[in-house]
Amino acid sequence: MSQALAAKVEARAATDEEVKFYHKNGWVKMEGLISKDLAAQMLERAKAEILDGQSDGARSHDRPAWRDVYNLGRDEMVEPFASLVRSPVIGRNTQRFIRRDVGIATHADMLAVKMPKGQPGSGVTEYHQDYPNFPLDRHGLLTFWIALEDMGPEQGIMRFFNGSHKEGPLGKRPLDTGGLLDFYPYVAEDYPLSEPLSLKAGDCTVHNSLVVHGAPANSTSDKPRWTYLMSYYPTDARWTGAPHHIFNAEAGLKLQEPVVSPKFPIVIGG
Ligand SMILES: O=C(O)CCC(=O)C(=O)O
């Protein structure tokens, strides 16, 4: 880690059972990844960014499926996000989930808040994989999806086709052009859909970038789904050169060389 971190944050290590579940299913729920207190601190800032940020045209954006703010931790060094994003415990968890003792770097972090019904940013997250969106020559990218407040399935919590990460890449498509199942209906026949989840503040799901996942709309009229995402990739992944908004030559990447740049903080070495 190259920067001094202001906040002391703690995240817990994944258990052997959680790692095993992830390998089999392509995702896992971790209860209490972070403390309720830490989640509450993050929630307070999230509310200021997502709700108040709208009035002054600040950095939140409405997408069909959520309202987001990118990289408070990776780029803006806002605490406690910055320290959590760089947590070596999260780095070690990632190594165990991807079954490789290689360096782990931060791809991005994001508040992704599914707004209440009727508001922009409240819609369905269509089923998709993450991996096809990246110009990386190997899989391994994964995402920690953290609940900042207690939430139920009616707020639009993610669901996963268990084991579908073993299908390999099934194509890239924007999230608002229909789901992957329109093109690969057999995925829903071959892989069971995970049960609807409820999460407590500080719980998370972790998902493999190849698992097929999505989320229903927020059907509540008054409860935003307060979620914070952090995603990571192995530092031996090489840049394929395909166009991408952040993994590109401006970030200093070189064709077929490992994706290593000061823009993407390394959280644990190999
Ligand atoms: O938060 C959501 O609804 C979807 C997030 C997602 O697709 C992802 O983290 O890959």
Image (cartoon, helix red, strand yellow):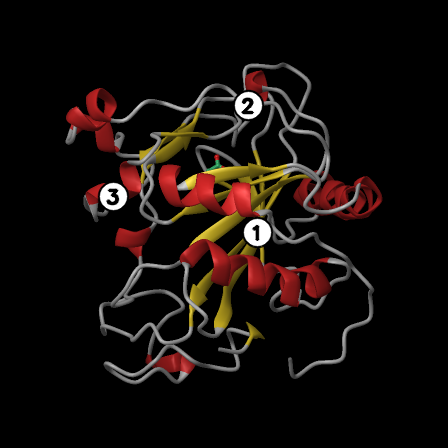
Q: Which mark is residue 110?
A: 1
Element under disc 1: strand
Question: In the shown orientation, is residue 66 left or right of residue 74?
Answer: left
**Nearest to viewer (mark 3 / mark 2):** 3
Q: Quadrant of residue 193?
A: top left
Amino acid type, residue under disc 1 in the picture: Met
Q: Quadrant of residue 203?
A: top right
**Nearest to viewer (mark 2 / mark 1):** 2
Element under disc 2: loop
Above or below, 122 against 68 in this view is above
In space, the residues marked 2 and 1 are separated at their CA atoms by 21 Å
Residue 89 rendering spot, x and y as whole percentages: 65, 62
Circles 3 and 1 in contact, beta carbons < 8 Å: no
Circles 3 and 2 in contact, beta carbons < 8 Å: no
Q: Quadrant of residue 32?
A: top right
Circles 2 and 1 in contact, beta carbons < 8 Å: no
- From the image, tell me which residue sits under label 2: 197
Is the residue indicated by label 2 positioned so its CB lies within 8 Å of ligand 1? no
- From the image, tell me which residue sits under label 3: 166
* Nearer-the-camera pick, 259 or 30: 30
In space, the residues marked 3 and 2 are separated at their CA atoms by 22 Å
